[in-house]
Amino acid sequence: AALRAQDRELAKLLAALDARDAWAETTLLVVSDHGMTRYERSLDVRERLAEAGVRARVIHAVATAQIHLARADDAARALEVLRGVPGLAAWPRHELPEALRYQHPRSGDLVALATPPLALLPGRDAGARFGGLLRLFGGALGAHGYAPAAVPEMAAIFVAIGRGVPPGARLPRVHAVDVAPTVTGLLGIEPPSSSEGRGLAFDP
């Protein structure tokens, strides 16, 4: 129902651009920020660490967890516990892969990254409590935030039409960081100074 409603709104926008004959000066980009995938089991990282005698404040984010240790000396034990969970990787903040862009002072002392079908959820989360019941009746639990290089379902959409886009043009895989410099290139202005991407060339 939500997708049908979005389609109707998009159709109204396209019809209005047609009616105004505005395509010569308009480029329309339709994008989404991420895809979705199913998960089948969940892990409460704080509880798992507590069982091993490690106290921590944990911020669960389904695919990732930020772990703030009560005692820095517990880092090695916490990493051992987390890395022993199938489908879970974990790093100290200063050893995080650059591609994750998590090396920030506000990140946890440790950061964990799950791979589907595992999700990182606090025990009180409704998905963690009722996921089995939902699946029993044919439902599914969805999540995002997994590493896109490892989980193709995280891919989103990118569709462009109008000024500067030759009809029938096809692009290779577009990275989310390329959207901002593409828009600024179409506008004829400089991209944001923090932009990492590159403007796309819409070759026919």
Image: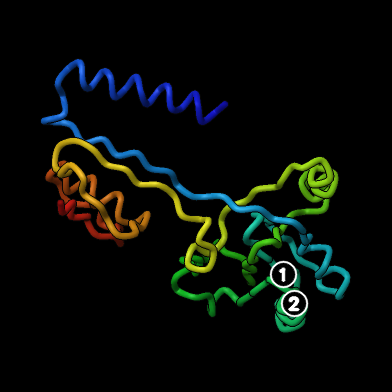
| CB contact under 8 Å: marks 1 and 2 | yes
Location of residue 22 (image quadrant): top left
Identify which residue is drawn at 51% across, 66% down. 102
Location of residue 13 in the rendering, given as x and y in whole percent from the top left corner: 31, 22
Location of residue 183 in the rendering, given as x and y in whole percent from the top left corner: 23, 45
Element on which disc 1 rests: strand
Q: CA distance from mark 1 to mark 2?
A: 9 Å
Location of residue 52 in the rendering, given as x and y in whole percent from the top left corner: 86, 75
Residue projecting furthest to the top: 19
Residue 69: mark: 1
For the N terminus, the quadrant is top right
Identify which residue is drawn at 51% across, 50% down. 35
Element on which disc 2 rests: helix
Location of residue 93 (image quadrant): bottom right
Q: Is residue 195 left or right of residue 167?
A: right
Camera-side residue of 170 and 99:
170
Location of residue 83 in the rendering, given as x and y in whole percent from the top left corner: 71, 78
Q: On the image, numbered disc 2 is attached to which residue?
A: 78
Q: Is residue 101 left or right of residue 180?
A: right
Q: Nearer the viewer, mark 1 or mark 2?
A: 2
Q: Give the amino acid at mark 1.
A: Leu
Above or below, 36 against 56 in this view is: above
Camera-side residue of 36 and 138:
138
Q: Give the amino acid at mark 2.
A: Ala
Above or below, 143 against 85 in this view is: above
For label 1, count other residues whose C-alpha is less than 10 Å away and answer few (under 14), some (14-19) or many (20+). Answer: some
Identify which residue is drawn at 83% across, 49% down. 132
The mark that comes first in sequence, 1 or 2, is 1
Identify which residue is drawn at 53% across, 64% down. 147
For label 2, count other residues whose C-alpha is less than 10 Å away and answer few (under 14), some (14-19) or many (20+). Answer: many
Location of residue 16 (image quadrant): top left
